[in-house]
Amino acid sequence: MIFDTHAHYTDGRFDEDRDDLLRSMAEHGIGQIVEIGASVQSTKDAVALADQYDFIYASVGVHPEDIARLTEEDMTWLAELTKRERVVAVGEIGLDYHYDEPPQDLQKKWFIRQLQVAAQTGMPVLIHSREAAKDTLDIMEEHCAWENGGVIHCFSYSWEIAQKYLEKGFYLGIGGVVTFKNSKKLKEVVEKAPLERIVLETDAPYLAPEPYRGKRNDSSYLTYVVDVVAELKQLEREEVIRVTEENAKKLYRL
């Protein structure tokens, strides 16, 4: 079954139909989902959601847009959360230079600290990197425990950068963007990367694939991503589903 490695079902856009939607996932061919922490509150919510559904796991971490109020006490708290049975990763963490705030130096500080938490606790990491390719890689070269594994979420850079992460044993997170007509660079990455290093993700409720671009995304739409990946790699869709599910289980040690 399809494994959605990155979703945000605690987002308010799911408030009206969250339970019905999640309980329908099996009939849409979705086997497992990882609910992603992106702030202190959404990390708490992700852990609670994973406790509620036996096919959902949680990651814990704070997205670069939400680091302004972080403290060292929060780092201790994140480390404690990684001991919970259904917590499988630290993330999403990283750098986002698309907007001017929070300041880049502050983003770097808390990216490094969360990488250190992951290293100390032996957890894989989920990396958010937007318009920050060099700084992300430079920080990870110094502070990432590569041997614990991880994924570059919503991979958006060139094949040359993809190779650097693949050489380190990381996975590339591929979602709805690969279905967009203007995603030539990402399509090249998918064509060239080994299928054994690709995991599927939605980033729901964001980044819905064609033909739902601009609408609320959910895991059932991953079938459209599977179709494009299968076409690009000239494989049967069942093979794409099988291998990416295996990859996700290896990434999260399930």
Image: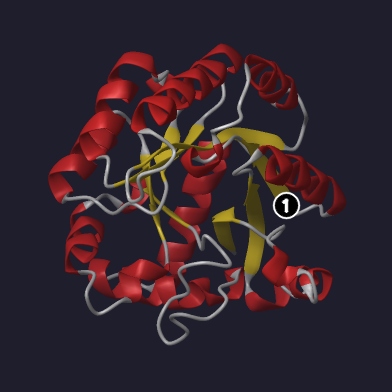
Point 48% across, 74% down: residue: 208
Q: Position of residue 87 (x, y in %)?
A: 70, 35
Q: In the rendered image, which quarter is residue 179 located in?
A: bottom left
Q: In this view, does 14 lie to the left or right of 113?
A: right
Residue 167 in view here? no
Q: In this view, does 123 lie to the left or right of 87?
A: left
- The C terminus, quarter of image: top right
Type of the residue with mark 1: Ile
- The residue tagged 1 is 56
- The N terminus, quarter of image: bottom right
- Establish if 222 lies above or below 54: below
Circle 1: element type: strand
Point 61% across, 30% down: residue: 69
Q: Where is residue 139 in the image (x, y as percent from the top left)?
A: 32, 22
- Establish if 163 lies above or below 77: below
Q: Position of residue 14 (x, y in %)?
A: 72, 70
Out of 91 and 196, give the one closest to the viewer: 91
